[in-house]
Image: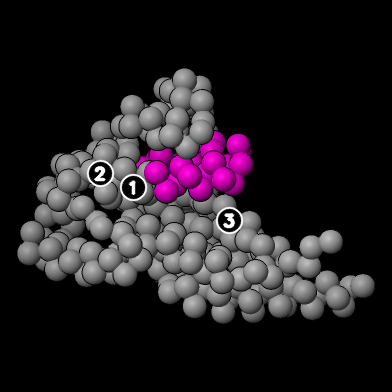
Amino acid sequence: MSTKVKLQVDVVSDVMCPWCFIGKRNLEAAAGQIDDIELDVRWRPYQLDPTLPAEGKDRRQYLSDKFGGDERAGEIYGRIRQAGSTVGIDFNFDAIEVSPNTLDAHRLIHWAGGQGADIQDRLVTRLFELYFLEGGNVGDHQVLVKAAGDAGMDAEIVRDLLASDRDREAIERQISTARAMGVTGVPCFILDNKAAIVGAQPPQALVQAFRQIAGDKAEEAQYRT
C-alpha cells in the first residue's frame, strides 16, 4: 500500500503569462523532489486581459498601450528572459505577432482535463511552447486544434467544439470565481483548498509549502483513525 500523501494543486494560470510558463517549470522541479507526496495537478483558467478581442491584437500595439512604449516593454521582458533562462526557457518574444484572447485556449485546457491529467499537462506545455517559443497565435482555432492533436486529443472533435459555445460561460464563471477569491496575479497555486502561493516561486518554496500542507493532512488523517 502506498504511503504517499495525495495533495491537490490547482494552478490558476493564463496561457499568455510568461511567469506561468516559468512557474510550470518550477512546479515540475518541485515535484521531482518529493517522493512521499503525490501531486494531483489541475490547471484552472485566468485571463490577464479579458478585454482583448476574439481575433487578438497586434503585439507591438498591445505592448505600447500596456507599457507606454518599446523601451519600457523591453526592460520588463528582459527581466523575464533572464528568469526564463534559469529554468531552461529561451523566450522568443520577438516572434510573437498577436497578443491573443485566451478564452478558447482555456476551454481547450478544460476539455483536456476531462481526458486525464497527463493529457492536460501535455497540452498546457504545448500551448506555452507555441506562444512563447514559436510565436503561435494561441487564440486561433487552427493553432489550438493542432495543439490538441499534439497532446493526444481528437483534433476533429476539438475543431467542432471550438466552433461552438461549449463551456464558454463555465470558463468565464471560473475566471470570475478566481477574481472573487482574490486572485489578482498568476500563477497562483492553491494547495488542497487550504493555502495559496502566488507567483513563479522557486522549487524549494513550493516543496516547503507542499510538505507543510501534506504534513497537516497526514496528522488529520491519523487523528481521525
Q: Is residue 164 visible?
A: no
Q: Which residue is mark 3?
A: 41
Of labels 3 and 1, the one closer to you? 1
Left or right of 153, for residue 96: left
Name the spot of residue 113 as percent of width and height, x first.
Answer: 57, 42
Does 103 appear in magenta? yes
Mark 3: secondary structure? strand
Q: Which residue is mark 2?
A: 134
Mark 2: secondary structure? loop
Contact check, label 2 and label 1, Cβ < 8 Å: yes
Q: Earlier in the sequence, mark 3 or mark 1?
A: 3
- Residue 118 vs 82, above or below: the answer is above
Residues shaded magenta: 100-126
Name the main secondary structure of what is drawn in magenta. helix
Q: At label 3, which amino acid type do we have?
A: Val
Identify the residue at horizontal 43%, vertical 27% (top origin). Answer: 162
Neighbour tally class for label 3: few under 14, some 14-19, many 20 plus, Cα within 10 Å? many
Name the spot of residue 43 as percent of width and height, x first.
Answer: 52, 51
Left or right of 38, for residue 132: left
**Residue 129: mark:** 1
Neighbour tally class for label 1: few under 14, some 14-19, many 20 plus, Cα within 10 Å? many
Left or right of 45, for residue 31: right
- Residue 123 vs 21, above or below: the answer is above
Identify the residue at horizontal 38%, vertical 30% (top origin). Answer: 146
Q: At label 1, which amino acid type do we have?
A: Glu
Q: Earlier in the sequence, mark 2 or mark 3?
A: 3
Quadrant the C terminus occupies: bottom right
Identify the residue at horizontal 63%, vertical 56% (top origin). Answer: 40
